[in-house]
Image (cartoon, rainbow, N blue to C red):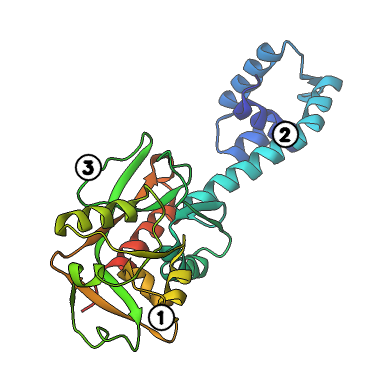
Amino acid sequence: MLDTHRLRVFRSVVASGSVQAAATHLGYTPSAVSQHINQLQRETGLTLFERAGRGIAPTAVGRMLAQESDEAMAALSRLGDLVTDMRSGRTGSLTIACFASAGEEWIPRLVAQLQREYPDVVITVDLNELNNDGKATTDLDIRTENPNENHSAPAGYTRYELMSEPYVAVLPADHELAPRETLTLAEVAEQPWVDESIAEQTCSRIIRRALTQVGAKPRIVARCQDHHTAFALAAAGVGVTLVPTLTTGALPKGATAVPVCDPEIRRGISVLVRDAAAGNPVAGRALELLREIAAPTE
């Protein structure tokens, strides 16, 4: 493989017409330029210059090497510019995985701010709720967690805790329990129940454990796999559903949310950041913004 630095020196001599002119242009001594040329000739096994009067001129193969290297050197220059831009966050991409309610409540604010600060960055957002193997594949992976379980980051990632949020009961706005400031889990479990949790996912395990704590087994009247449908069913008077607070930004007219206590039920939210992306200013800024967005308000 050719030494690109020596190739640049060689091309400078060809373009400048002399070793002295190239040395002045590059900020080197003429001796240093000559050494680079001699090393390149040994490296290639080619005679790149020949005597021409009191100076030197490129040989036919020297001219061909200079000409054919134009595209390669331009590509290297573009690559160097790309690296500089990526280091400054001016270009490139960022991939984010998240669960549905974070995608609705946090991601629009996050992406809008990143776009204002880094207009050339392309941001891809994917849902991770059906990722059952626990593996992370994106630059940032925003995840729900069961506070009663141990958590660690997969290989190649660093985990950052963002927040812990309580669960609320969503029920028809005209329900007899709707005016209450809080409800016990036992009271909620006595109502017809709309189950919106996906089996063996984080929220399902959290709710199942809480129900076991109070010895309750609610009568399930409907099942669904998204909170929008569960809210619509609650608003229609079908039953109540138990959800984390973050989801309630999507409550429809006709439904209301009441905090649940005794016991208080919570879920954690963390973000995994790919170690390889840690030096990317966009990824770093995304983590800062997520922490700001997730921070409790006064």
The residue that disc 3 covers is 150
The amino acid type found where label 1 is placed reads Gly
Q: 79 above or below 229?
A: above
* Mark 1 element type: loop
* Residue at 47% from the left image edge and 54% from the top image edge: 96
Q: Which residue is mark 1?
A: 237
Which residue sits at x=52%, y=67%?
A: 115
Instruction: Look at the picture and state if 185 lies above or below 271.
Output: below
The residue under label 2 is 72
Residue mark closest to the camera, 2 vs 1: 1
Q: Is residue 266 above or below residue 80?
A: below
Q: CA distance from mark 3 to mark 1?
A: 38 Å
The 10 Å Cα crowd at callout 2, few under 14, some 14 to 19, many 20 or more, is few
Residue 55 appears left or right of 211: right
* Of the image marks 3 and 2, the number of the one nearer the N terminus: 2
Neighbor class of circle 3 (other Cα within 10 Å; few <14, some 14-19, many 20+) is few
C-alpha distance separating marks 2 and 1: 69 Å
Left/right placement of residue 235 relative to residue 61 reads left
Q: Most extreme residue toward the left, as rendered?
A: 262
Tell me if mark 1 has few (under 14), some (14-19) or many (20+) residues whose alpha carbon lies within 10 angstroms of its own: some
Question: What is the x, y in percent for residue 242?
Answer: 31, 67
- Asked whether disc 2 touches disc 1, contact meaning CB atoms under 8 Å apart, the reply is no
Residue 65, given in percent of the width and then of the height, sits at: 79, 25
